[in-house]
Amino acid sequence: MSRIVKRTNGYFAEFTKGAGKKRYRKQKTFQKKSDAQDWLVEMEHSYLQGSVSPKADMSFADYYKHWITMYKAPVVSANTVDNYQSSYNRIKRKDLGQIKLKNLTRDDIQTYFNQLNRSHETARKDLTRIRSCLRDAFNDGIIPRNPSAGSINIIADPSLTKGNERKFMAVKDFRKLQKYLLDRDYNLLDVNCFVLFVISQTAMRVGECLALKEDDIDEINCTLRIDESWDSYHKFLKQPKTKNGVRKVPVSRDVMNKITTWVRYQRREMFKRGLHNPDRLIFLNYKGKIPPASSINLTYKRLQKRLGLPGTFSTHTMRHTIASMMLNSGEISLVYISRFLGHSNISITQKYYIDLLPDQVTNEDKKVVKLLALA
């Protein structure tokens, strides 16, 4: 609360807003009480206009960059920082990035999305990050209101937004691909295809698969442990994407035999070539390197064309396809599927796949009606 106190050297004025760590305080001494009162009125006006903090005069792009550096980079993964940076690059190229933080309005944000021309998922992520940034600016007293708090429509380019037909491969096509990968013989030149084989049987993320080590293989119980992920861009092992990403996935005996045969073969070839593998990674190629994720994706598209498939699906769609098959079976619980995929929580699984279950939802509706019926 602002106040004026008479002291021996004049009138002490203190302007205060907020509380605790978010408190903003400014002090000044005047010879006249009227000057102190005028100053408090001026400070109140300036605060309401959002110009008390020097940061309010920063362009939104500059403040967003500062926010990433100060509050996100120290605590999130390098990959996530790259994603925030991608949003920053889009923002700074648009008018939104040039507007001063204190002058930013909801109309400005909506205009940005009206002109973005990106996929729905890209636009959704940009909006989430913009809202998080502006919410912090508001809570810190840098701006007097949060211009992103109201309703903002996501305008997406339909040609860049994947429908279900691009997220999920037809089951018969996926089975054809699975069989080809299972029946194939592999050598060190085929590491990319062997990665695809393991993903086709486990629904792992590419980075999770590339990080597999010999110690992660439980031959007796036919499981693979996932506790790390390979960052192809920054070239280091990191924690999985979510805390539930640490998990064990089951495989069939045939698949396990294929994997253990590969490990023994790779070990011999590494020794022959004088290549070192201190971490005992199972997907080192003939150069003793982990292949980049982009090359896995390229190999997958080439493989689809070789098998007479459209060739439009990314490696990640194998996860979606396997998840949809599990859900459509009607025999595997959503909780288990969520854990199998390593989702952070079950709501993520529902978000991506609930629209694939109209028949199952109808059946569950009937069960609920029967359960609640009086007779």
Image (cartoon, helix red, strand yellow):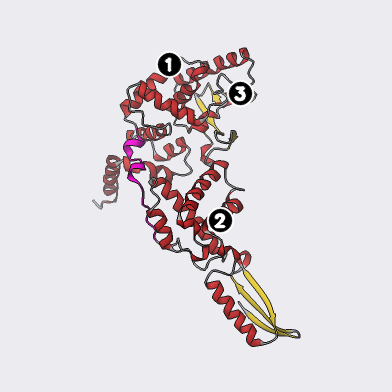
Measured as percent of width and height from the top left, residue 241 is found at 52, 40
Span highlighted in magenta in the image? 151-168
* Residue count near mark 1 (Cα–Cα under 10 Å), binned few <14, some 14–19, many ≥20: few
Q: What residue type is labelled 1?
A: Arg
Q: Name the residue under label 2.
A: 62
Q: Name the residue under label 3.
A: 280
Q: Name the residue under label 1.
A: 184
Per the image, label 1 sits on a secondary structure element best described as loop
Q: Quadrant of the N terminus?
A: bottom right
Q: Is residue 67 above or below residue 171?
A: below
The furthest residue to the left: 375
Q: Which amino acid does label 2 sit on?
A: Asp
Q: What residue type is labelled 3?
A: Arg
Per the image, label 3 sits on a secondary structure element best described as loop
Sequence-wise first label, 3 or 1:
1
Provide the major secondary structure of the magenta segment.
Answer: loop
Res 18 → quadrant? bottom right
Task: Please tell me which residue is depicted at 53% across the width and 17% down the height of the picture.
Answer: 188
